[in-house]
Amino acid sequence: MRLYDAHNHLQDERLAPFVVEVVADATTSGLVAMVVNGACPQDWEEVLALSRRFPCCLPSFGVHPWYLDSITPGWQDELVRLLRAAPSGVGEVGVDGYREGIDQALEERVFLDQVSIATQEDRPLSIHGLRAWGRLYSLLKSSKLPSSGFLLHSYGGPKEMVSQFADLGAFFSFPGYFLGAGRENKLEVFRSIPHDRILVETDAPDQPLPAQLERVSLPLAGDGKRINSPANVAAVYAGLASALRVPIDQLAKQVERNFLALFRKLFPETAAA
Ligand SMILES: [Zn+2]
């Protein structure tokens, strides 16, 4: 089986000490490609460097709503420069309803700037909408969007919004975290998503799977929290296949088609096409 991790942060400092073994383990488990998402201008060069070091790493550059403090004047030009330096996407970007104290006006301005850069450069967007799905929908609905579509990573919105987002060009990625106890409602939502819009993600180093499902366990972080690895992607596929009640190889083939449709511009060989 050929597997794809639609969303992670391999550049994160928590994964840095293990990066070589993590990529090797992920490749052994069948992973063909992963989208590595920058979260602030300070980590974009590292994302680019990883993509040059490991061909399975496809780069994406963005400002995440939790890191609005990281931007300095001219960040938009730097984003465009990186997008032109390598086949790449725009993300992780988004709006957030989870953390308190985010300046919403600034958040929306930064988000919309990135949506318009992605559209101008025609690159797929990887979007975070945690507890802000309604606000995200209004912003997307009134924007021009890239032709290849966009990813709603860890889609946790209501079932009722799936078709509205899908009409705008959304793909929805499923994280292993949703396999934990008490998240049956999230599985129910994914059962309602058209199969040609489903993707699979680890969001590593975040969103660990339930410990008993992990294939790879990394040492705990300094704060005592578990560190997720992209090498767990096969376990996320297995959990999603059983939730959707489809054979895993059938799911893998569908996810491959979906990944290639959305992220085509991130592959060096097809970027120019
Ligand atoms: Zn993320």
Image: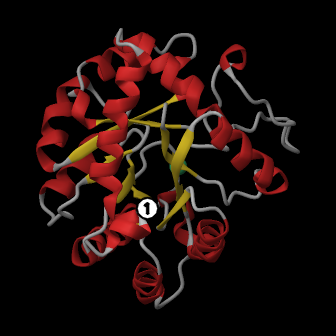
Q: Residue 68 or 242: which is nearer the viewer?
A: 242
Query: Which residue lies at the image location 39% right of the left edge and 56% below the top edge?
Result: 94
The residue located at (38%, 46%) in the rendering is 129
Count of labels shown? 1
Q: How is the image coloured?
A: secondary structure
Vertical position of residue 81 compared to residue 136: above or below:
below
248 relative to 143, above or below: above
Q: Secondary structure at mark 1?
A: strand
User: For the C terminus, which image quadrant?
Assistant: bottom left
Q: Position of residue 28 (x, y in %)?
A: 67, 37
Residues 125 and 135: in front is 125
Q: Against 135, is 52 above or below?
A: below
Identified by mark 1, the residue type is: Gly
Query: Which residue lies under the disc numbered 1?
Result: 91
Q: Is mark 1 within 8 Å of ligand 1?
A: no
- What residue lies at 41% left-to-right and 43% top-to-bottom? 153
Instruction: Please provide percent x and percent y for residue 195.
Output: 25, 27
Please say if 244 is above or below 199: above
Write the residue at 46% across / 91% down. Answer: 74
Please identify the quarter of the rendering in which residue 258 is found: top left
Residue 9 position within the rendered picture, expressed as x and y whole percent measured from the top left: 60, 53
Report crowding for label 1: few under 14, some 14 to 19, many 20 or more residues within 10 A (C-alpha).
many
Q: Nearer the viewer, residue 173 or 185?
A: 173
